[in-house]
Amino acid sequence: MTYGLLAALGWGVSTLLAAVAARRIGTLRTVVLGEAAGLTGYLIVFLIGAIIGHEALVGNGATVLDGAVVGRRSWSRPAARCRQ
């Protein structure tokens, strides 16, 4: 239960900070900086896992990197411009 409460608190704080940043520097810059910061964090976890030889961290890092590539591709073309 404690982890759930901490996750909810973290989610709320991050939403508040993202809203403040979006108002100050714009939506696109906020998204790009947020995604870059998240990917950097995952890369750090992945590299630490690879250095110390922790297979679970390396496996999760590779999965996250795969997800980042798919996520980037899904944002590369706005839905309004897609033809059906």
Image (tube, rainbow, N blue to C red):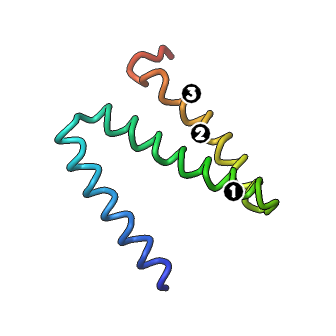
Please rate how many residues cluster around mark 3, counting C-alpha atoms within 10 Å: few if below 14, some from 14 to 19, many from 20: few
What amino acid type is highlighted by mark number 2? Ala
What residue lies at 64% left-to-right and 47% top-to-bottom? 64
In the image, residue 56 above or below residue 33: below
Front one among 64 and 49:
49
Could you say where residue 51 lies in the image, as x and y percent from the top left? 76, 55
Could you say where residue 63 lies in the image, as x and y percent from the top left? 70, 48
Mark 2 vs mark 3, CA separation in Å: 9 Å
Instruction: Check residue 68 in the rendering and tell me which mark sits there, or answer none.
Output: 2
What residue lies at 54% left-to-right and 51% top-to-bottom? 41
3 relative to 33 in the view: left or right? right
- Can residue 12 be seen here? The reply is yes
What secondary structure is marked by label 3? Answer: helix
In the image, residue 1 above or below residue 51: below
Q: Nearer the viewer, mark 2 or mark 3?
A: 2
Q: How many marks on residues?
A: 3
Mark 1 and mark 2 lie on one chain; the one further toward the N terminus is: 1
Could you say where residue 21 lies in the image, as x and y percent from the top left? 24, 45
Instruction: Check residue 73 in the rendering and tell me which mark sits there, or answer none.
Output: 3
In the image, residue 79 above or below residue 67: above
- Can residue 55 be seen here? The reply is no
Q: Farthest bottom residue?
A: 1
Q: Nearer the viewer, mark 3 or mark 1?
A: 1
What amino acid type is highlighted by mark number 3? Arg
Which image quadrant for residue 31? top left
Instruction: Check residue 48 in the rendering and tell me which mark sits there, or answer none.
Output: 1
What residue lies at 51% left-to-right and 17% top-to-bottom? 84
What amino acid type is highlighted by mark number 1? Ile
Mark 3 vs mark 1, CA separation in Å: 27 Å
74 relative to 21 in the view: left or right? right
What secondary structure is marked by label 2? Answer: helix
